[in-house]
Amino acid sequence: MNLLKKCLNLKKYFKAKKYEDFNKSLEFERGKANYDAGKFQEALENFDKLLELEPNHVNSLQLRGKAYYCLGKFEKSIENFDKLLELESNNVDALYIRAISHLSIKKYKEAHDDLSKLLDLEPNNIRELLTRGDCNRLSFRLKEALTDVNKSLVIEQNNLEAIFLRGVIYYDLGKYDDALADYNKVLIIEPNNVRSLKRRGKAYLMMEMPEEALVDFNKLMEIEPNDISTLNDRGEAYCMIKAYDEALEDLNKFLAIEPNNKSALGKRGVTYYAMGRYEEALMDLNKSLNKGIWYRVNHEGADNLDESQRIQNIQSGEALNLRIRGATYCQLCIYEKALEDFKNSLKIEPDNAFALRKRGEVYYKMKKYEYALTDLNTSLKIKSDDVSALKIRELIYRLMGRHEEALEDLSILSEIESNNGLTLLNEEPFVNSNDDNESLTNSNSDNESSLNSSTLCLECNQPYINHAWCQSCNAKRFQQNFSNWTSGDQHIDEFIQYSQLKAKKYEESLEWIPYDQLEKITYIANKDSGTLYKAIWTNGRIKEYNHQKSNWYREKKFINNNWNYISNNNDDTISEIYADLSSGIIVSLKHRHSSNINDFLNEVPYLI
């Protein structure tokens, strides 16, 4: 009887066991089907039920870990594979998925350990070599990254994934030519490869080839019109070619969607700076830098950047943003903050000629001439043909009475600008052939004709467009004086005013001369339109602005042999008037009809 009972119980047990095994198998198959169909949450429910019954079910642990990974639950995925790898320490799939889960949460050391173990098991596995190469890249072990990728290319030389990744590593190393070569290889085979187009465009930007970058970014916008990240990059390219309105349009569109994106804020700040919109530039640059790598590093008290931080700062644009914010502070006369930004930017890029030159300019404005010269000299060692640096240094030498060195800089500038087809600098203040001899030995001389012999405007500190002539500042002075004189004729007033606002050198600025400023008026001839005279203008014509006395320096006793008295002018006609703007002479022209001064100027476009 006992034996029969035992047999019946055993039969029930096997029946129950068979049913349980069937349920486990069914649950696993359901989970696998859901996983294969991309229904990862449903798959998790299936595997959870099965693992309650059999906690060490290896296949369920493996698929559950993958499902967690696909759902972005990386910590759960790692926890799952930790358990699986206790059971099977050399499970290749488990090691790989755990490695990429670690990568996803930036645990690079743990990822590297798993990948290295995998490569001990499978030394020539291309997938694992490339993943470890990317892990090394992300942790700024760039040489090791390059070694892994090159090894994979020895195994499979035309692997596009490996070629692309090597291009990315070269880019991170600052080897933009090599990066470009790899991106080109990929794009020859896959012309619409989005990742390679995007990366090649960025490489072009770093190589200061914005036109080529624009070609790639425009193509990307055709392939993926909804990818707003391209707007950010294209905005930078537009800024580099000085298409500022287009740059702002792209960056504003991008920032409307991602208003706190530090990269786009920085690029828009740089664009505003280039447009002279300094307050707006400062707002954007402050926001960008307060969110970036430099802010975090600097506020942790780090005095020296390691190589990875330096590369990150350069390629993220933060080194540039620091320089441009410094330049913006300089424009706004906030010199101490400008100096701080230039100091910090030079920690990142010690040999950046722009930062050195701009800091030299700040020191010049603060009258710290020796400091200024130190920076300018260093800048010019890096970029010997930097016209702006040479002009500032020439001015400082002049102010310090170091005339021989100033003369040397002017000579260099003349050669540079002559070679570039630009207007030669006027070196007259240094020549012993006129009344300016005093200025050669006494930098504090009150000799008015030498006051503005520098090459930067003493008011706005921008380069003169001609000797001692700042168009923007002089135009403002002329405009402020419009109400203080009149010829009595609206059209003539407008003609003279237009010439003053547009003058690029003193000879191009016409003036109305009251009769009482003329001496020795001598008859020349009668003409159909009036009478021609010559005279001496007692005040003399404008030559340059005297910043010390806040008035115009004039050429005294200016003699003009061709003064023409206009006798038949009326509201509808401008006749008998022409200015030879290269010599300042007013001569007679044939009769011209014009309804207004702008029409007249359009008819004679070479006047202004």
Image (cartoon, rainbow, N blue to C red):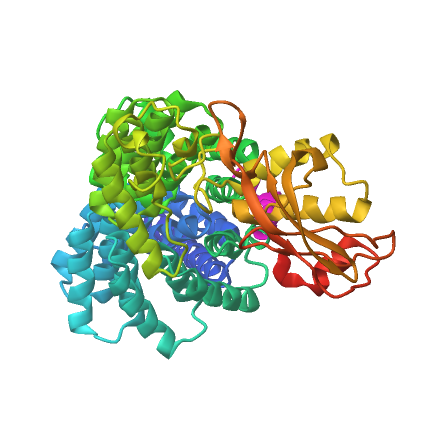
Q: Nearer the viewer, residue 148 or 164?
A: 164
Occupied quadrant, residue 133 = bottom left
Indicate left or right for 50 with 350 as reference.
right
Q: Using the image as rendered, state which of residue 425 and residue 201 is in the foreground.
A: 425
Percent coordinates x, y for residue 95 in the rendering: 25, 52
Q: Quadrant of the C terminus?
A: bottom right
| Vertical placement of residue 281 versus 427, above or below | above
Find residue 450 and report its image quarter: top left
- Looking at the image, residue 222 sits to the left or right of residue 365; the answer is right
Residue 551 drawn above or below residue 382? above
Kindly identify the residue that appears in the image at 40 percent across and 43 percent down: 52
Instruction: Identify the residue shown where x is 32% and y is 60%.
Output: 419
Does any portion of residue 310 appear in the rendered image?
A: yes
Q: Is residue 110 visible?
A: no
Residue 549 locus on image (x, y percent): 50, 22
Query: Is 301 or 436 nearer to us in this picture?
Result: 436
On whether residue 166 falls in the magenta region, the answer is no
Is 357 above or below relative to 128? above
Q: Position of residue 165 (x, y in %)?
A: 29, 61
- Chief SS of the magenta region: helix
Quick check: is 257 in the magenta stretch? yes
Q: Nearer the viewer, residue 526 or 604?
A: 526
Could you tell me how many numbered marks the image carries? 0
| Residue 415 horizontal side relative to residue 47, left or right | left
Rendered image quadrant of residue 577: bottom right
Q: Is residue 394 above or below residue 195?
A: above
User: Residue 257 at what x, y percent from top left?
Assistant: 60, 45
Q: Which residues are magenta?
A: 248-260
Outermost right residue: 571
Tell me which residue sits at (41%, 30%) in the image. Answer: 451
